[in-house]
Image (tube, rainbow, N blue to C red):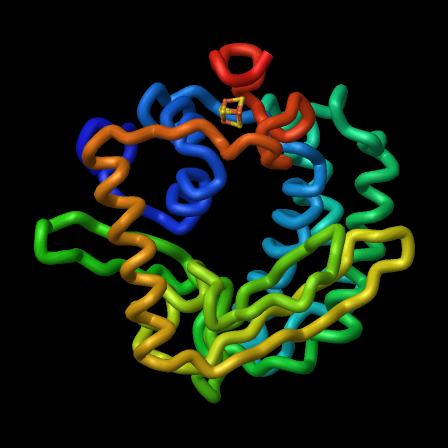
Amino acid sequence: MKGTIRSYLSVSQIRKYMTCGMQYYYRYVEGIPEKMGSAVLRGTSVDNAANEHFSLQAQTNNGLTQSQFVDFAVDVHQKEQDSDTFDWEKDDITKDKSKDRTSKLAATYHKDFGDKFKAKEVQVELVQVDNDGEKFKGFADFITVDGVIVDNKVKKRNVTPDLTRDVQLVKYADMANVDKVGMAVVQDITTPKTFYHHAEVTQDHKDRVNKRIEHVKSGINNQVFMPAPEGSWACTQKWCSFWEICEFGK
Ligand code: SF4
């Protein structure tokens, strides 16, 4: 992408720009690293365990046992928790409690989803180059043997999503040339619950998402970086890493 620190566009960049153009500017034009909350670490830990589980299952027909799955996720948490990426001071959970929560999330994911899917490919790299030679790149969590692109999500709230408008899943379905998408959600609460959402996406859905991406791309290439809309949840000290340096923040 012109003038940015990345040579390609991704779903996280699109989402960042749609949340706040200035956040995009600080992160991807200035290259300032962002501090994350521990929810991201719990999500990554479960995601990595799921990748391992389904890779093994695709190769040998047997994935990880529940205790192996939990150990894998907790191990990722342990290794990553002291990284500079995470800001525990602003978090409402300690490292130990977050690790315990990760263990429960992983056990719940394995119980409800471990045998639900048969993965054909895991961590699938998808790359598309447009007419201007600009690259879009992403990794799908896994694609099942019956052609469903599945995204794992660890989320605080379970809001039933309209997957036909989900930029990530619809774009990945377009790139992988499939028309079925699914989202395997584990709710990040004291007693975690799971939800599986799925949808069929049509060419119309893909066209609409591609149009949205084109708009974002044009904004970035023309260096249009608008602040978050007034009253946006993102434009708060808790949720914006650039609060201290942005002229629209503090
Ligand atoms: S303070 Fe508000 S406008 Fe500035 S980067 Fe953060 S969210 Fe965007």
The one nearer the camera, 107 or 31, is 31
Q: At 35% from the left edge and 60% from the top edge, which residue is drawn?
A: 125
The reply, left or right, for residue 192 in relation to residue 121 is right
- Residue 201 in percent (x, y) is at 42, 79
Whether residue 84 sits left or right of residue 192 in the image: it is left
Instruction: Identify whether 70 is placed above or below 145.
Output: above
- Residue 70 in view of the camera: no
Task: From the top left corner, tell me how far across and down residue 186 is, in percent.
Answer: 73, 62
- In the image as oriented, which residue stretches furthest toward the left? 132
Residue 250 in which image quadrant: top right
The residue at the point 28 percent across, 35 percent down is: 6
Residue at 75%, 47% (x, y): give it: 74
Quadrant in which residue 96 is drawn: top right
Which residue, as the protein is rendered here, is positioned at the far front?
230
Depth check: 70 or 34 in front?
34
Left or right position of 128 against 204: left
- Residue sitting at 38 percent across and 29 percent down? 226
What is the quadrant of the N terminus in the image? Answer: top left
Relative to 102, residue 161 above or below: below
Asked if residue 73 is positioned above or below residue 241 in the image, the reply reads below
Q: Where does residue 45 sit, x and y in percent of width and height? A: 66, 49
The residue nearer to you, when weighing 241 against 226, is: 226
Q: Please tell me in which quadrant of the rendered image residue 151 appears.
A: bottom right
- Residue 34 is situated, as x and y percent measured from the top left of the image, at 52, 26
State whether residue 215 appears in this view.
yes
